[in-house]
Amino acid sequence: MRRDTRPRILLLGSSNTDLVIVCKRLPTPGETLLGGTFQRSAGGKGANQAVAASRAGSRVVFVGARGEDEFGAAAAAALKRENIDIRHFKAHKNISSGVALILLGGRNRENVIAVAQSANDLVSAETVQAARSEFAKSDVVVTQLEVPLGAVKEAAKIARETEKPFLLNPAPACVLPRSLLRLVHTLTPNEHEAAILTGERDAERAGRKLLDAGCRNVVITLGARGAMLVSAQGTRRFPAPKVRPVDTVGAGDCFTGWLATGIAEGLTMPEAVARAVRAAGIAITRAGAQGAMPRREEVD
């Protein structure tokens, strides 16, 4: 039997159902806009990144929580169709699965997102410990901040104990303890998140601060301007391809999933970042989050 040589990624994170309204522009506070179109799609930063990594060519184990409801059943089925291992995507009684309300608007399809309290909030250190055996089998461990910080810290701790690179997408952003940042192999904030983490509006200075705080690599996504890699080797920018954007929701998750796959494959950081930028450039030309994630042959 031929051995499966695909990179292996453990992905701890959230799963949501995205309820999206596409408007001509985003409304201002207190304003009601009529005439937008409605879409429903599978989302959640964790699940999005899992799909992106799977389509990039990784074997993915997803660790998370869902409710025993129609949204949760659909989310699990969607991940299973993407050949993602969902044995650690646990169902819980008497709580809703994750739901996100999203407004898209403007020429560049900017977005505003609100996420409800849900089963994602039940993901805990114990949830992570239950999947401990999967860490040793994985090449990279990935998570975000849409699940409780205790679970994120536990994943970082076990990743360090098992000597696996720990990739943290700090979204939604909050100030993080240095004890956690020192365990991070690669941090992937956008410009806004980098500013919240450091108090620095300049992306490069923010990256340097995060490097000084203990992160080994900091990759700041810059939207239509691509991405910036800040590491001990210096700062390098990666321009984004010129495309006509349709939907920017999930672009950062696409980037993170592809970056994790590149690291797991043993690419250099510049190689992994450059390919992730290309993948995200394709994703924003399509509607939806998970459905927009490109496949390996498209990016290569």
Image (spheres, rainbow, N blue to C red):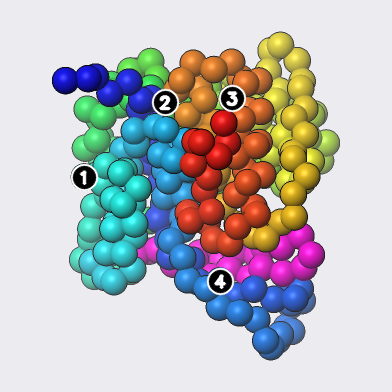
> Distance between the Cα atoms at labels 1 and 2?
18 Å
Q: Residue at x 55, y 39 (%)?
A: 298
Q: Position of residue 154 (x, y in %)?
A: 36, 33
Q: Quadrant of residue 186?
A: top right
Q: Residue at x 47, y 49 (%)?
A: 48
Q: Position of residue 270 (x, y in %)?
A: 66, 20
Say which mark, if any, is on residue 20.
Answer: 4
Residue at the extreme front: 297
Q: Which residues are magenta?
A: 97-119
- The residue wearing badge 1 is 87
State if disc 4 and disc 2 touch (CB < 8 Å). Answer: no
Of callouts 4 and 1, which one flags the residue occurring earlier in the amino acid sequence? 4
Residue at the extreme left: 1
Query: Is residue 266 rendered magenta in the image?
Result: no
> Distance between the Cα atoms at labels 2 and 4?
31 Å
Q: Tell us which disc is closer to us: 2 or 3.
A: 3
Q: Nearer the viewer, residue 255 or 204?
A: 255
Residue 42 seen in the current view = yes
What residue type is disc 3 on?
Ala
- The residue wearing badge 2 is 140
Residue 198 seen in the current view = no
- The residue wearing badge 3 is 272
Label 4, secondary structure: give it: strand
